[in-house]
């Protein structure tokens, strides 16, 4: 009897606490509801509908009536301009990633040093481009690189590096180089912050043990820091790839895809077909292009994650083998 009484008493005490917890969570859900609705309406719904539009020849006006099946996809795969934009996008993503991964890690390692002075100042300077609107960056950089009297040409001529102005945005090769460099500069600060967060999360006792063992800075970097950063590096790599997909505003304001479509990326290609001001908008065709490129990036992202997991599993297996060999030897 006493046991039942005790149980009832515990439930009576727990009841109000559970209700308070539920009320608190209900308020939390209420506060995130507007953002959730915004995400559903402006992200999830358009993605779902793009798969529907891809099967129609639709201008964005009137009902969906002209069903074309896979004709949009077939037309897309035969379009040389699409493959040009597709290749430009992959070049931009690949080269930008190759530039940013080592350079931002190097800067993070420098700023993470205890003896380095002015850390806050340099972090702020490097992070300023991140919080600057990308379209504004594109417009400013167009003034810096855009013509014979541009700032870069004037500076290089004054330094004697070049003898005559270079049409940086007027030649296919140099235009793509400028686009990649500006995009890398814009994203540099946030990647550096990611690396810094990873470095500052590493356990201090590991470094103390390395110091006791007499390891130099480079030995510690190679044998301790870099291996421990591998999970962080995987996340940063994936974030860089995903971020590099969203280059529309920079391309639109800096080069508008020129010269001769040399810097046209898939998102600008989609924009030109979906919101064409000179012809008939082709929402269905643009949706098919978006689906193809989105699925390609999804597959690349999965492959990168899979390769990172294989690398981690291989290292874990080697470490386990070394530990077993050491134990057997002892």
Image: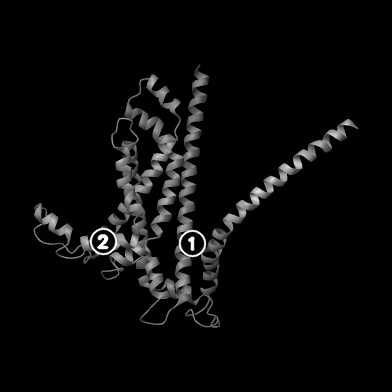
Q: Residue at x 48, y 61 (%)?
A: 295
Alpha-carbon neighbours of circle 1 within 10 Å: few (<14), some, or many (≥20)? few
Left or right: 106, with 73 as reference point: left
State how far apart marks 2 and 1 are (Cα).
Answer: 33 Å
- For discs 2 and 1, the disc positioned in front in the rendered view: 2
The numbered mark at residue 186 is none
As drawn, 58 above or below 237:
below
Alpha-carbon neighbours of circle 2 within 10 Å: few (<14), some, or many (≥20)? some
Identify the mark nearer the N-term, 2 or 1.
2
The percent position of residue 289, horizontal first and vertical second, equals 44, 69
Whether residue 77 appears in this view of the structure is yes
Q: Residue at x 30, y 59 (%)?
A: 137
Residue pointed to by mark 1: 295
Quarter of the figure that contains the N terminus: top right
The numbered mark at residue 140 is 2
Viewer-nearest residue: 228 or 36: 36
Left or right: 316, with 95 as reference point: right
Outermost right residue: 1
Residue 194: which quarter of the image?
Answer: top left
Tell me the element at label 1: helix
The percent position of residue 320, horizontal first and vertical second, equals 51, 29
Left or right: 26, with 49 as reference point: right
């Amino acid at each position: 009897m006493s046991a039942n009484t005790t149980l009832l008493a515990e439930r009576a005490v727990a009841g109000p606490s559970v209700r308070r917890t539920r009320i608190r969570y209900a308020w939390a859900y209420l506060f995130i509801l507007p953002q959730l609705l915004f995400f559903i309406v402006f992200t999830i719904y358009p993605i779902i509908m793009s798969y529907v539009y891809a099967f129609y020849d639709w201008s964005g006006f009137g009902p969906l009536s002209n069903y074309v099946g896979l004709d949009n996809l077939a037309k897309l795969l035969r379009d040389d301009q699409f493959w040009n934009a597709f290749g430009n996008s992959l070049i931009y993503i690949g080269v930008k990633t190759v530039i940013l991964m080592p350079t931002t890690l190097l800067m993070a390692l420098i700023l993470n040093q205890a003896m380095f002075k002015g850390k806050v100042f340099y972090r702020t300077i490097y992070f300023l481009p991140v919080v600057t609107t990308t379209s504004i960056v594109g417009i400013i950089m167009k003034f810096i690189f855009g013509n014979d009297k541009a700032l870069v040409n004037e500076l290089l001529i004054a330094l004697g590096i070049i003898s005559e102005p270079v049409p940086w945005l007027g030649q296919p090769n140099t235009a793509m180089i400028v686009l990649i460099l500006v995009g890398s500069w814009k994203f540099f600060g946030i990647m550096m912050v990611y690396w810094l967060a990873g470095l500052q999360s590493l356990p201090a006792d590991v470094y103390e043990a390395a110091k006791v063992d007499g390891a130099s800075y480079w030995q510690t970097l190679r044998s301790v820091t870099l291996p421990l950063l591998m999970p962080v590096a995987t996340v940063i790599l994936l974030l860089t790839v995903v971020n590099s997909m969203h280059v529309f505003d920079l391309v639109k304001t800096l080069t508008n895809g020129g010269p001769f479509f040399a810097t046209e990326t898939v998102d600008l290609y989609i924009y030109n077909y979906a919101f064409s001001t000179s012809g008939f908008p082709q929402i269905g065709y643009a949706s098919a292009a978006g689906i193809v490129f989105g699925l390609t990036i999804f597959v690349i992202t999965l492959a990168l994650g899979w390769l990172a997991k294989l690398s981690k599993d291989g290292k874990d297996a080697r470490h386990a083998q070394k530990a077993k060999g050491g134990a057997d030897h002892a």
